[in-house]
Structures are given as C-alpha cells and as structure tokens.
Image (cartoon, rainbow, N blue to C red):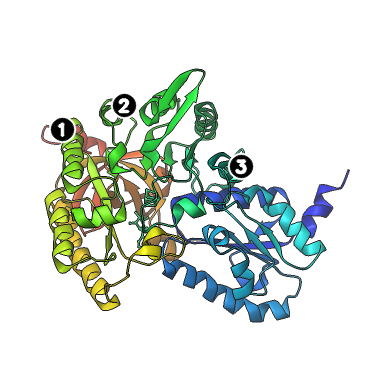
Amino acid sequence: MQDPSAHDAHNGKLFIQTVGCQMNELDSELVVAALRKHGFQLTDDITSADTVLFNTCSVREHAEHKIYSALGRLKYSRRRRPQQVIGVMGCMAQKDQKLVFQKAPHVDIVVGTGQLSEIPGLIEDARANRGRHMAVSLARRDATRQTVAASFESYDPLRDPEMRPSAFQAYVRIMIGCDKFCTYCVVPMTRGPEQSRAPRDIVQEVHQLAAEGVKEVTLLGQTVNSYRHTEDGREYRLADLIAAFHDTPGLERIKFVTNYPRDMGDDLLQAVRDLPKLAHYLHVPAQSGCDEMLKRMKRGYTVADYREMMQRIHATVPDCAVSSDFIVGFCGETEEAHQKSMDLVREFRFKNSFIFKYSARTGTKADAIMLDDVPEETKRRRNVEMLELQTEISEEDNAERIGREYDVLVEGPSKTALKSADGEQGPLTQLTGRTRCDRIVVFDGNRRLTGSTARIRIDDCTATTLIGSIVTREFQHAPDGGLPILS
Ligand code: 5AD
Ligand code: SF4
C-alpha cells in the first residue's frame, strides 16, 4: 500500500474561489473536504497555489465575467508555475464545456456540477498527463430525462466535520436540479433535472451533523418546497421530511431555501407554525408584479396567486418574515410593468429583496425567442429605484423592533470584528446572530457565546441589521422585563 504521507506531501496547496449561491458554497465545502483527505492543504494565496479551482455561476453574465477575468490574470502566473493545475467546476463548466478551454487555454480541467466526485482523480490525471481533461453531464435535449438525470449525480459524501465553515451551522442538500424552466433561467441546464434525495439519507446526514455539534441546518434546493420522494411506499413532501428529523437531539433551528410560490402547500405552512425548531422565515421569489411579465417568464402563477399565497402564509404564521427576488428589465418590461413590481414590494413589505437586472443567458427560451429590449441604463435605474424602496421598507420594519427582545442564535464575531485586530479588543467583541425570523442582529458579547442562544434587546437598527445588547438575567427577571418573544 502507498504511504499516505508521501502521497500527501506532493499534493501541495489548493486555492478555491467560489461565486454564486449556497448550493455552490456547499459544493466547494465538500470538494475541499475530499481534497484535504487526499493531502491537499488549503491556502488563500492564489499565487503560491499548486492547484487553483474556480467554482462558478452562470445565472447572470456578470458572474461569468468575473471568473473569466480571474482566469485571464492566471495566464501570466501560470508561466512562472508550469506545474500548476487550473480547474473550472460548477455551473459555468457545465454550460460552456469546451468553450472554457477556448476562452482560457491554460485551463486543465473542466468539471460539471454532476461530476464533482471526480475532481481528485482529474487533478491527478492533469498532473500525470498535461492536456485538457473534461467531465460534464449530458445536455437536457441529448437523451431521455432518466439518462440525463443519471448523468447529474448528487454530490453529498460523508462530511468531514473540520471542513465546515461554521462548527454549528450546516447546509444539507435535499434536491438537485430544476424542472420549472422559467424562460430567463439557465439553472435547469446547468444543474439538470429535478431530483429529490432519499429521506433516509437526509435524515442520516442530519443525525450525523447534530452529533457533531451542528445546531442549525439549512435545507437546500432550487425549489426546495417542491421536494417529493417515495420511500417504502410512502410519499414524503418537504413537511414530512422535516418532521422525520425535527426532534433530532441537539438540533435547534431549521431553515429551507429557495421556495417556489406555486408549491407553498398548507401542510408546509402548518409545519412552520407547529414545529418549534423551524425558522419563521420564507424566501419566496416573486420575480415580477406584472401578470404579463410573469407569463413571459413562465413562472406559472399570477399576482393574484402570489397574493393568495401571502395571505395563507400570514394567516397560518402571523409573524413569518418573507423575502423575495426580482428581475428588473426583463424582455418587454414597460415602465407600467415595472411600477407594478414596485407596487408588489409596497404591498407585501418583504423583509428584504434580492434585485437583479435581467441578463440574457444562452440556452434559455427567453434568449432564443424574446428581445432583450430594455436598455441597460433603464435596467440600472429600475434596479436602483426598487432597491431604494426595499431599503426604506426594511429600515421601517427594523425600526419597529427597537425596544423589543428576541432570542438570537449567535453565529460568531461579525465581519467588522474579524477585520479588527483579532480578538485583541478585550473579552467583548461584536457578535452577529439571527432571530427566529432570520433578522440579523449585532451586539457586544463574549465570542464563547457562538452557537448558543442569547436574549437580545434591540436598541437601534439599519436597513439590514438590528443593533442590540445582551439582556442580563437580572433584567429578564425585573417585573417590567418580561417582554414576549416576538421572533
Ligand atoms: N437574469 C437576471 N436574474 C436572474 N435570476 C435568474 N436568472 C436570471 C437572469 N437571467 C435571478 C432570479 C433568481 C435569482 C437566483 O437570480 O431572481 O431567483
Ligand atoms: Fe431557475 Fe425558475 Fe428553476 Fe428557480 S424555479 S431555478 S428561477 S428555472
């Protein structure tokens, strides 16, 4: 048998850059964990890395530009390090395939979202035999649904607890792919057909994570509330799946993203109401407030349907926070259509919204048959307008919380605290955490509170953050101190 330490020694330093969604963050975490097992050491210095990996996103053109620019910069450093292996993985690798080699000839490896388990072997191949190495899934048109689905493999190896970015938080993938085919979206092509993982595997993974000290799991799926899997003759929807692991000892909070409006069933809302570990927070992208646009986007619902869903959410879980995504400047979006989206933001007062300028994507229906006719300048103005409106709403919403108390799951030192001289500022540092409604709270406390729940009184706020202080035991027991837990 080969001596593992000898093997480790020559695998060298690994640099990885990740762009895009939480699905990509999880993929990177799992790939890094696998490569660490093969003796790679993580570095954040790209210039000294022996292996450089880019985990990519294709949802908007901007994300692709970012990666191609980074690849361009590597061309020169590669001349100084001829042994360096450069790999492109994820959505852009699946979408562009050989085009990656054409645009960036110094790339050695292109690996799609369904072949991540092959990365250690591909790096080894690239070292042994210079040249181009590619592993990608089948295109959706090129074979039957079943064959294409089989070529997109869910990559969820057993976790290495040391590899998680946070000791007590973890992502758990419950689905891969998407079958909704919204006309603007490249995800059904880059992530393949919608496939739900088996409840048994997910429950086992959550048990394992909780046993390792994880207190919060975030279930991931492109349309997470479309989850559907039949096991032992029983059909599991998302609410059934959550019920199957909800009581796991040690687990304290459960979130799930991203939801599809049409699949927001009453059973799921009742679970959010009745199961104490579930966050009172739903991310349900509306994308537009104009029926004509929603139809062109092929979202499968009208504004009236979305309103009906919001009414059900608030009737079942009155304090539930809802956030949304919007696309501005989609093909044919008139000023009137844009104002309808603005009205939707005013009507539903989302906790926050992610707002994107439409970006035409090769391979999508919109790109094939619609005209990207809203000028860039107009897209930019609409984006700013909507962002300003949402910021105003978020600020007012946060201001209403001043003076109230919340139970906050502490995530650790805030980014500003991390930037300041590490931990030298005495026993107290600025910590960050979230309420049950997913509102971000910062407050001063001992970093040992990380992973525990602290009672915080809100003193101030910005549009994105509540600013508070720890409620001491004495205060909590004072006759006027027992404010209700609101979030
Ligand atoms: N252009 C702009 N935004 C897009 N999104 C998806 N595809 C596009 C596109 N082609 C946005 C949607 C989605 C979020 C993840 O990205 O709002 O919910
Ligand atoms: Fe893209 Fe629509 Fe699927 Fe979301 S539901 S991933 S926007 S195709």
Taking depth in this image into account, of 154 and 457 the one nearest to the observer is: 154
* Of labels 3 and 2, the one closer to you: 2
Residue 319 showing in the rendered view: no
- Is disc 1's CB within 8 Å of ligand 2? no
| Residue corresponding to mark 1 | 315
- Is disc 2's CB within 8 Å of ligand 2? no
Query: Which one is earlier in the sequence, the residue at label 2 or at label 1?
Result: 2
Q: Position of residue 205 (x, y in %)?
A: 54, 33
Vertical position of residue 108 compared to residue 203: above or below: below
Taking depth in this image into account, of 363 and 108 the one nearest to the observer is: 363
Quadrant of the rendered structure where residue 60 is? bottom left
> Which residue is at a point 24% across and 57% down the rendered structure image?
293
| Residue corresponding to mark 3 | 160
Vertical position of residue 26 compared to residue 334: above or below: above
Query: Which one is earlier in the sequence, the residue at label 3 or at label 2?
Result: 3
Badge 1 marks a residue whose secondary structure is helix
Amino acid type shown at disc 3: Asp
Q: Are marks 3 and 1 in contact (CB under 8 Å)?
A: no
Q: Position of residue 197 (x, y in %)?
A: 51, 34
Q: CA distance from mark 3 to mark 2?
A: 29 Å
Badge 2 marks a residue whose secondary structure is loop
Left or right: residue 162 versus residue 255 is right
Q: CA distance from mark 3 to mark 1?
A: 41 Å
> Which residue is at a point 66% across and 70% down the rendered structure image?
107
| Residue corresponding to mark 2 | 275
Residue 58 showing in the rendered view: yes
Left or right: residue 145 versus residue 36 is left
